[in-house]
Image: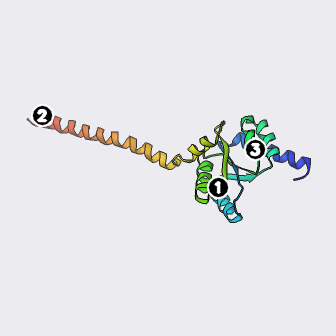
Amino acid sequence: MGSLEGKKQVVQDLVEKFKTAVSVVVVDYRGVSVAQITKLRKELREAGVEYMVVKNTLLTIAAKEAGYEDITGVFKGVTAIAFSENDVVAPAKIISKFIKDNKVMELKGGILEGNVLDVEGVTALGELPSKEALLAQVASCFQAPIQKMAYVLEEVRKSKEGTEVA
């Protein structure tokens, strides 16, 4: 990747990733073993998240070109970045769990649907329930009123039947 053309291509690819991602998480990956990173990469890949280690200068150029100058301040030290085009929660959730379980790696910041997040924002995002869990919660909210409505209608039906017979 030493050539200027190679670097330009990497920057263009990164600009595209910044523009198409619904969620981005930036981390400092110091202290992570090869075995740990291999496991993390596999988990991220299975969730449709792309994880990569990129030079800070290239990340800075790409982020600025994509309109995310506000995040460039976190591109210091050893930096890795995770991009998700589909799931807003997956990168933050998987990486936050990895950090908690392994006591290595450090969140630096992120982007959620076009908005730059600080470490607290990424942490909060990582604590959100999965899409499936949220859908189950919403479904249960609908279920209770429907059951009540069915009960009320049944009672109305019974009372009308009672009056017609008499």
* Residue position for label 2: 163
Give the total number of marks visible in the rendering.
Answer: 3
Residue 41 is left or right of residue 65, and the answer is left
Residue 113: name its quadrant.
Answer: top right
Q: Secondary structure at mark 1?
A: helix
CB contact under 8 Å: marks 2 and 3? no
Using the image, determine if residue 127 lies above or below residue 70.
below
Disc nearer the start of the sequence (2/3):
3
Looking at the image, which residue is at 36% across and 43% down?
143
Residue depth check, mark 3 versus mark 1: number of the one nearer the observer: 3
Gap between marks 2 and 1 measured at Cα: 64 Å
What is the quadrant of residue 41 in the picture? Answer: bottom right
Residue 164: image x %, image y %?
13, 34
Q: Earlier in the sequence, mark 3 or mark 1?
A: 1
In the picture as drawn, the residue positioned furthest to the left comes out as 166
**Residue underneath mark 3:** 75
Which labelled disc corresponds to residue 44?
1
Question: What's the colour scheme?
Answer: rainbow
Decide which of 58, 106 is in the foreground and name it: 106
